[in-house]
């Protein structure tokens, strides 16, 4: 059986309430309260998105995320009462796609989940407004939009779905400063994304594509404004 969302949270009442709310509003959901139950559930069912708490009793949501990332790239949204920047950065660096702080409003969380599901289920990038070209190139990087593949000097580099979408948007607008708000709107498709999520995705792209990630030649920060992908050939 296929579910839109699996909630993994040891606060059973909250998990059950959230699942019931989602089910009332067209997001088919289920919940489990432990890492073991999550892994067992995924063996039996197909899931499009996971809401994952950090504190899971004897285990950690961080540990579970690392394990899940060995076998799946489905979006994982951390939900936690922790507000430390370190926790947020850890969550994003180990494979989380976003970080949502508790307490949350069910209607806002539902809107966030719907936006993420729409984003990840899409097979084209801004298909209704963007003309898809066979490839985008800059420097040693070639982006094949149709096959969703990226090569650096002919060698394929694996990108997560949102990393690919962000890179494609930057490359489609190369040599133009793109404000963060535009990236939130055009790449993530909603206003719930924070600077931390964008910054981590940018850093991951640099680590995978730049020769010197700490001294980027192409994907550059324009302080106080946003980001720009500069084509070194120009």
Image (tube, rainbow, N blue to C red):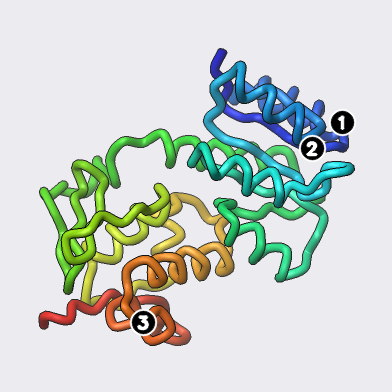
Do labels 3 and 2 touch, CB within 8 Å? no
Real-space Cα separation, disc 1 to disc 2, in angstroms = 7 Å
Residue at the (68%, 49%) spot, across then down? 78
The CA distance from mark 3 to mark 1 is 46 Å
Nearer to the camera, 65 or 226 = 65
Where residue 18 appears, as percent x and y from the top left, is 76, 31
Does the CB distance between marks 1 and 2 fall below 8 Å?
yes
Please say if the residues under marks 3 and 1 sit with CB atoms less than 8 Å apart: no
Q: Position of residue 56 (x, y in %)?
A: 83, 42
18 lies above or below 190: above
Q: CA distance from mark 3 to mark 2?
A: 39 Å
Mark closer to the chain start, 3 or 1: 1
Answer with left or right where residue 118 lies relative to residue 124: right
Does residue 35 show up?
yes
**Pointer 1 local density, CA inside 10 Å: few below 14, some 14–19, many at least 20:** some
Q: Is residue 226 above or below residue 123?
A: below
Q: Residue at x 32, y 75 (%)?
A: 210
Disc 2: which residue: 9
Residue 112 occupies which quadrant of the picture? top right
- Callout 3: 10 Å neighbours few (<14), some, many (20+)? few
In which quadrant is the N terminus drawn?
top right
N-term-proximal mark, 3 vs 2: 2
Q: Secondary structure at mark 3?
A: loop
Q: Say whether residue 186 is visible.
A: no
Residue drawn at x 43%, y 84% as measured from the top left? 214
Residue pointed to by mark 1? 12
């Amino acid at each position: 059986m296929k579910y839109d969302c699996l909630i993994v949270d040891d606060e059973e009442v909250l998990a059950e309430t959230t699942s019931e709310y989602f089910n009332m509003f067209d997001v088919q959901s289920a919940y489990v309260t432990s890492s073991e139950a999550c892994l067992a559930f995924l063996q039996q069912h197909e899931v499009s998105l996971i809401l994952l708490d950090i504190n899971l009793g004897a285990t950690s949501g961080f540990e579970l995320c690392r394990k899940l990332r060995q076998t799946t790239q489905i979006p994982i949204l951390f939900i936690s009462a922790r507000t430390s920047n370190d926790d947020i950065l850890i969550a994003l660096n180990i494979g989380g796609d976003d970080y949502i702080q508790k307490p949350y409003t069910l209607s806002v969380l539902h809107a966030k989940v719907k936006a993420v599901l729409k984003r990840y289920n899409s097979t084209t990038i801004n298909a209704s407004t963007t003309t898809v070209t066979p490839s985008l190139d800059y420097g040693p990087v070639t982006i094949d939009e149709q096959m969703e593949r990226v090569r650096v000097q002919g060698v394929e580099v694996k990108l997560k779905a949102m990393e690919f979408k962000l890179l494609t948007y930057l490359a489609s607008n190369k040599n133009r400063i793109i404000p963060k708000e535009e990236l939130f709107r055009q790449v993530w498709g909603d206003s719930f994304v924070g600077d931390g999520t964008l910054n981590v995705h940018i850093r991951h792209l640099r680590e995978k594509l730049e020769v010197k990630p700490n001294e980027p030649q192409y994907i550059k920060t324009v302080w106080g404004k946003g980001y720009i992908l500069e084509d070194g050939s120009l």
